[in-house]
Structure formats: C-alpha cells, structure tokens
Amino acid sequence: MLDLRLPFAVSAFGSPDAPPLVVLPGGPCRDPEYLEDLAGIGESAHVIVLHPRGTTRSGGLSRGWWTDADDVVALLDALNLPFAPVLAHSAGTRLALATATRYPGRITSLALITPPATWLSGSASDLAAIGASRAEPEVVTALAALGEDAATTDAGFIEQFQRQAPAGYAKWTERERGHARVGRVSLAAASAWFHDIPGDAAERILAASLPPTTVIAGDADLLTGVQPVADYAVALGAGLIVLAACGHYPWVEQPEAFREAIIAWLSRG
C-alpha cells in the first residue's frame, strides 16, 4: 500500500520507473484484489490502484461515482502527476468518465474494460440472445439471478452476487470459480456508489471532449451484453476491441490478448 495521506487507500505494482497507469476497479466498490496483476501489465507500467471509498482498506462510503471523481484527481495531485492514463473496469468506468468530463486534461487516455453500457448508449440488452447458447446449470441459475429484484440485506446481496457470478465468464472452470470468490462486496458500498448522480450525467459525458478512448469487451459477457457495449463505444467516439471466448474479466480468461491490447493502448497514449 502507498501512504499518500489520502482519505482512501492506494496500492501499486509493477516497476516504479515505468510510466504511471491509474486503475479504477469495478464492483461497484469491490475490493481490488480481484484485479490480480491485470495479466502482467506491470511489466509495461507502474500500476497505481485506487481503492474506492467503501472498499475494505478505504472504509467509509462512496459519495457517488460522479463526486468521487474528486478522489481520482486528488490521487494524481498526491503523486505530482499533472495527468495520466486511466484504466477502469466495469462500474469503475463510470468514475473514469466522470473524471474525464469534470476535469478535462487530467486523463491522457482511457481504457474502459467491459463497461456497463445501456445507461449511456440507450441500447436494448442482448443478454437473452447471448445466453441462449449457455446451458451450464450454474449459468442458467446466474441468468435467473440477474433478473431478480435487488437484495435488501448485506447477506442477501453477497449471496445474490455469488449466484450471478457465472454469468461473468465464458466458461465456468476452477479458475473462474476461484476468481469469483475474490474481492469483498457490500450492499451499503454498492448502493452509495449511485448516490447523488446528476440526472444529466450521461448527456454531460457525451457532450464532453474526452481523451482518446479504447473500449474492451468480451463476446460472451452476460453482465454487459455485446451490442450495448459496441453502441457505447460509438457514442463515446472510442475504439472497440471485442475479445473472443471472453466474459467480464478478460485478464482471467484471455490474459495474453488482454495484455497485448493494453500494451498497444499504452503505447499510443
């Protein structure tokens, strides 16, 4: 962990002599251990991971992803970085876009990994079409869990999160089962993430002058769908990479392809 005297925790890996890369985890507010080493990208970057408010090491609760953009800028300031590239996963992509919109120039380029998309693109979900080919019992159960009302207790939220987990992977082997158990989540933290978001947040993001952006999707991601993410990339004016045989966590299922895509993105930034 880095001791930067900030109201949230920060960890780092990779070479301190390499160019900095700020990483924003998803969940929302899932403990960042689930990111592992992001398929070894620390060989090409000094990876600095912000632990959002509401995660175990940061404590407290998020003030909402729109306001928490202040934390990304506070991290850059603490590191004496006038700007940096940002990689964000899943729910963390909202925080990345809020930062780029509210603080122009502080993010040099964006990599948005398997982002939730319908809130921004307005596209209809294609979950049913993607899921039609998945007959594994765990995936069928996960799809049913995705259609349930949100849990109202912390224990129920965690149990529901675990039942939904198989939908996040293109296959469900011991590797994916083990990964799905890493990274604490909580109902209070996830709920706070969506607190006090401006009603026109999507419109403000789409009207902003964003930095060069790459979106990485998985062709078997039942958590985001595929067409909505493609439409999201178009709406943002972003490049799109769709990884084959891949779900919501590409560094787990397609580590080589993911690492190559990130290294190429960094080289352009």
Image (cartoon, rainbow, N blue to C red):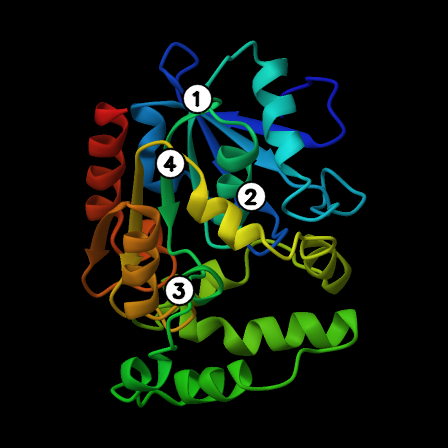
Number of the front mark, 3 or 1: 1
Mark sitting earlier along the chain (1/2): 1
Q: Identify the mark at residue 110; answer none if there is no mark.
A: 4
Number of the front mark, 3 or 4: 4
The amino acid on which the numbered mark 1 sits, given as a three-letter code, is: Ala
Residue 183 visible in rendering: yes
| Whole-number angstrom distance, CA of label 1 to CA of label 2 | 15 Å
The image quarter containing residue 172 is bottom left
| Whole-number angstrom distance, CA of label 4 to CA of label 2 | 11 Å
Mark sitting earlier along the chain (2/3): 2
Which residue is found at the position 42% from the left and 62% from the top? 117
User: Residue 138 at what x, y percent from top left?
Assistant: 43, 84
Which residue is found at the position 48% from the left and 45% from the top? 205
Q: Residues within 10 Å of mark 2 (few under 14, many from 20)?
A: many
Mark sitting earlier along the chain (3/4): 4
Label 4 element class = strand
Residue at which label 2 appears: 95
User: Residue 161 at what x, y percent from top left?
Assistant: 59, 71
User: Residue 54 at what x, y percent from top left?
Assistant: 73, 47
Q: Identify the mark at residue 84; answer none if there is no mark.
A: 1
